[in-house]
Image: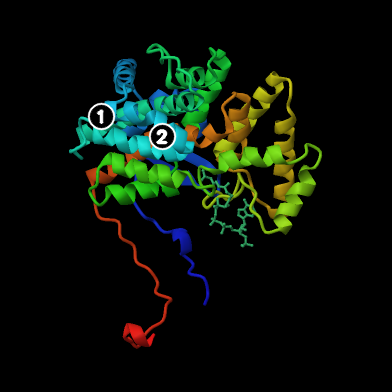
Amino acid sequence: MADNPTKGLADVVAASTALSDIDGKAGRLFYRGYDIHDLAGRTSFEETAHLLQHGTLPTRQQLADYGAELVRGRTLGALVEANIAEIAEKQAPMEALRSLVSLAGAEDADKDSNESDANCRKAARLTAQQPILVARYHAARRGVTVREPDPSLSIAANYLMQITGRVPEQREVDIFDECLVLHADHTMNASTFAARVCAATLSDMHSAIVAAIGTLKGPLHGGANEQVMRTLESIPSGGVAQAVRQKLADGEKIMGFGHRVYKTEDPRATHLRKMSQELAEASGDATYYRMSKEMEEVVFAEKGLYPNVDFYAATVYHYLDIPTDLFTPVFSISRMSGWTAHVIEQHADNRLIRPDSEYIGERDQKWTPIDER
Ligand code: ACO
């Protein structure tokens, strides 16, 4: 039987959104009509989250108010506090985030409301808590105490400080902040779709975010950034071309390449490549950047595929001293702003999401009693 042309819902319009838009042929991405190239490096992650969740780039006063709400929202509840150490012992980072967000939902003050105001408050709290949860998880599994977040610092600065245990340089903060902006939203990607499907049953925001985190975890989606780094680490620095060709000959996918929507360079990769190069040169050991460049050339020559957002994000995070198994959680810190905005949008104009399926099984089967089967 011929493959269903819409298998994997390719090219199916599953929702209407005013949040983001992609031109896959031209390689362009927009958040609420703003070109990502205009936002990246000029707009902070907090401004971007406000844009997505509240609809506008904030004024200075709105940003101050939203920033204060994020600082208040960082506080973790008693249930999360009581369980974080055991979860850190037993679960991998993305599993732990899924569990911890679920626990946070149980004690959220607005847990029983899907009204827009309540959803906006939950969106701010989820956005504020996500980096803290990752930092607290990372500290708990190492048996150390994490540095308290500084209320005067941005999400990017606090996260780098909490994860690395050192005060980051301003350029590192700026680069990481830009990474968060680049990952904030991306139309009907798999995790956002999962969140919207859940929200469309009129389930609550935390349930939708748990679905999204579980979906982002997979290596065909957000989990790819970690796999990119593992691939680079597993290849001898002089053997990139050979290793890539061997993987392709073995029918393996090269992580960090290809995209359902982009038929040209992913505009986020353009920024991430530059950041990776800058950090590599500053580190004094550009081996992984050079290997990445070579891998990009070989994959393009062999398969005509371009790097996606996850490819150069891997080396950027590596040079920022973020542990490899925390790369996908970084994605979730950023994408929380988009997921929550999509839940707000879904609840504001809801209809149950319930696609059809094509039946390919047996028909007209004759039922037989159990002892005769
Ligand atoms: N390496 C090798 N071949 C690839 C790759 C890759 N990374 N990506 C696609 N292809 C090939 C497939 O093998 C397939 O070839 P075929 O037609 O000869 O069978 C063809 O290109 C189409 O690939 P599909 O997997 O059907 O494309 P789809 O649109 O379903 O998948 C996806 C897109 C999942 C991103 C895919 O390119 C992939 O698996 N990439 C690697 C994982 C990855 O980097 N994921 C992150 C994506 S970005 C994000 O989620 C943030």
Q: Is residue 113 left or right of residue 327?
A: left
Q: Report helix, strand or loop for mark 1.
A: helix
| Quadrant in which the C terminus is drawn | bottom left
Name the residue carrying label 2.
87
Q: Can residue 364 be seen by looking at this rendering?
A: no
Q: Position of residue 249 (x, y in %)?
A: 73, 58
**Place of residue 194 in the rendered image (x, y in percent of width and height, measured from the top left):** 37, 49
Could you say which is closer to the camera, residue 275 or residue 212? Answer: 212
Which quadrant of the frame does ligand 1 lie within?
Answer: bottom right
Amino acid of disc 2: Ile
The quadrant holding residue 30 is top left
Residue pictured at 40% horizontal, 72% vertical: 358
Rendered residue at 34%/36% (across/down): 101
Vertical arrangement, residue 205 with respect to residue 50, above or below = below
Q: Amino acid at mark 1?
A: Arg
Q: Is residue 207 above or below residue 157?
A: below
Determine if the C-beta at disc 1 is less than 8 A from ligand 1.
no
Could you tell me if residue 337 is visible in this image? yes
Q: Place residue 273 in its image quadrant.
A: top right
